[in-house]
Image: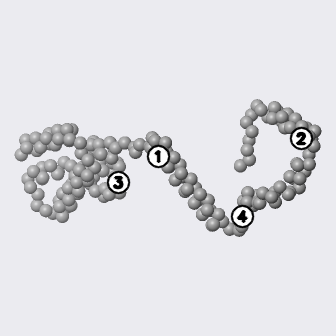
Amino acid sequence: DKGDAVEDASVAVKMMSEKVISSDDFAKLRKLRLQRSIELQLGRKRKAEEMSTTGSESEDEDDEDAPQSDGERGMTGRLPDAISAEDLKGKKAKPRTKAARLASVVAGREDFKDKLKEKSKNRRGGKTNKEHQRNKPQMMALQSRKQKVKKARTASQKMQGMKKHIKTLKMNAKHPKRRRA
């Protein structure tokens, strides 16, 4: 009996090292081990081989530190040193073609626009000042006092403004211009 058990164990180890086991196979193994442990707890009569092998098993302690997915929670019978198919799987490759990348960008844009629309719908009150400025009719903006003063400037005033602007750019050229958020 002991010789058969040792031989079965060596055959199982050899099979595990030669054959790649999928995640479905791991799930089946866990189910079988769970059924077996339930049968033992409920008091089914055991065969002589089972009596000799179950006395030394302590799988419950090993299960605590092993990672579990939602479908395996509460199931005993994880293989302690085996690698699952999930561990062997790589990450999903990013799209390499320009068309695929553009498609993902466009999808992101649409999501962002929807998000902005939703945000403006849920906001209390009316439009913000920025929205008012952006949506102001162009002819109305051209009739403003600021624009009229700008149009009425003489050539010498424009040159003075440009020289002043260039001077400030030279002074601030050492560090990048900051934008208001």
Q: Amino acid at mark 4?
A: Lys
Numbered label attached to residue 100:
1
Q: Position of residue 133 (x, y in %)?
A: 76, 58
Q: Is residue 6 left or right of residue 133?
A: left
The answer for how far apart the CA atoms under marks 1 and 4 are is 37 Å
Q: Amino acid at mark 1?
A: Ala
Q: Amino acid at mark 3?
A: Ser
Q: Residue at x 81, y 60 (%)?
A: 140
Q: Earlier in the sequence, mark 2 or mark 3?
A: 3
Q: Earlier in the sequence, mark 2 or mark 4?
A: 4
Residue 46 drawn above or below residue 157: below
User: Mark on residue 158?
Assistant: 2
- For the point 91% across and 40% down, the residue is 155
CB atoms of marks 2 and 4 within 8 Å: no
Work out whether residue 145 can be spotted.
yes
Q: Of circles 1 and 3, which is in front?
A: 1
Q: Residue, x 77% and y 60% (percent of image)?
A: 137
- Marks 1 and 2, how far apart in space? 50 Å
Say the numbered circle drawn on residue 69.
Answer: 3
The Cα–Cα distance between marks 1 and 3, rounded to whole angstroms, is 32 Å
Pointer 1 or 3: first along the chain:
3
Q: Amino acid at mark 2?
A: Lys
Which element carries disc 4, helix, strand or loop? loop
For image coordinates 73% across by 36% down, the residue present is 176
